[in-house]
Amino acid sequence: MAPDFLPPDRQPVIIAARRTPVCPVNGALRNLRAHELLAPVLRSLVAGLTLDPASVTDVVIGNAVGGGGNVARLALLEAGLPVGVPGITVDRQCGSGLDAIVLAARLVAAGGSPLYLAGGVESTSTAPLRAHRTDDGGADFYRRAQFVPHAFGDPDMGVAAETVAKEYGVARERQDAFALASHRKALAAIRDGRFTDELVPLDTPAGTVSSDGGPRPGLTPAIMGRFPAAFVPGGTVTAGNSCFDADAASAVVITSLERARELGARDGLLVRSTATAGVDPQLLGMGAVPAATGVLAAARVKAGELDLVEFNEAFASQTLACLDQLGIDPGRANLDGGALALGHAYGASGAVLVTRLLAQSRRADTECALGLAMISMAGGMGTAALLEYRRL
């Protein structure tokens, strides 16, 4: 067994992780606001470990397109946690959920054996309309926030995905094949019940939602080939090889190794290394590459030594380009499918990656298995976390 990087009272470890189903925007979860998606997940985590709710140090939650007002605090109170438990909401756009977990890990590493609930949530279906105030007091509505100064071009996501495809030579056929494989892997995971233990069913006005709503069984190579270019005329990025917007929440329990053992946790993901990095905003989908390179170098781990890789599939073009640059076989990433099939619930997606890694590690039950969670995000950034599965 490899030695711990930090003393037991400062070594961060994730001992539980849950998520809601991930459902397409305006789909089965369209009537639930962000705090109503997140509260059942927080409640499930506390109940699953029989935690004293008052022992939670803080709730750290990522959110990208919500209405403000600190959804972390709103959701924890909705979940029934005591009023003495605080909450903080962080925004690093698509990386928000993973960055919330990274932030909590760094707080654990500061010492004192605290315990955090950390993750992310996005209700894209109920996201508020946004507008700039005009000189006459009117409203100038806009679809997305400005990510970088206009001098940098501030490209839309799909346009940047096309730039990446061209820059890194990712052909249309390869993008389509990767996206189709994501759907097929997700469908197989659903059929085999591999998501069951991590899911928190949600009650909606139309009934209980207990499974992911995105994977499409009818897709074939021929159908994938018929999708037209979606963002740039004559381009290779289509609706078929791009993710779709979604609603979801996901969160973890993260504490020190010392505290985890006191709680009787049997296993968990030790947080070995984390990093966030920036890249040219024109190639914003490549942000995960320097972040992942940094965490692997810090831990003296080679890409070929990774047992599990979870990378948010915003677009097949940028996913493949990043994996190529890192020397990771795309067939080894996202073993149960990714956002191309399940959907991208912005603020929640990074936390979903960690939830998947814990579930996959427990199925494999291999001591010291290494997992990498990584995500690229708007504005030209990426966050990565190297996690090691251990029996505690």
Image (tube, rainbow, N blue to C red):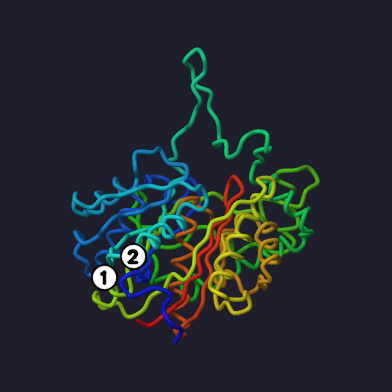
Q: Is residue 332 left or right of residue 1?
A: right
Position of the C terminus by quadrant: bottom left
Q: Is residue 164 above or below residue 389?
A: above
Instruction: Report the residue marked by disc 2.
Output: 253
Q: How far across and down, in percent of the image, does residue 358 sit?
A: 43, 72
Instruction: Report the residue marked by disc 1.
Output: 49
Q: Secondary structure beneath disc 1?
A: loop
Residue type of the residue flagged with mark 2: Val
The image quadrant that residue 333 belongs to is bottom right
Q: CA distance from mark 2 to mark 1?
A: 9 Å
Question: Residue at 28% of width from left, 67% of height from top?
Answer: 113
Q: How far across and down, in percent of the image, does residue 150 sit?
A: 65, 33
The image quadrant that residue 179 belongs to is bottom right
Total of numbered circles in the picture? 2
Residue type of the residue flagged with mark 1: Leu
Q: Is residue 331 above or below residue 311?
A: below
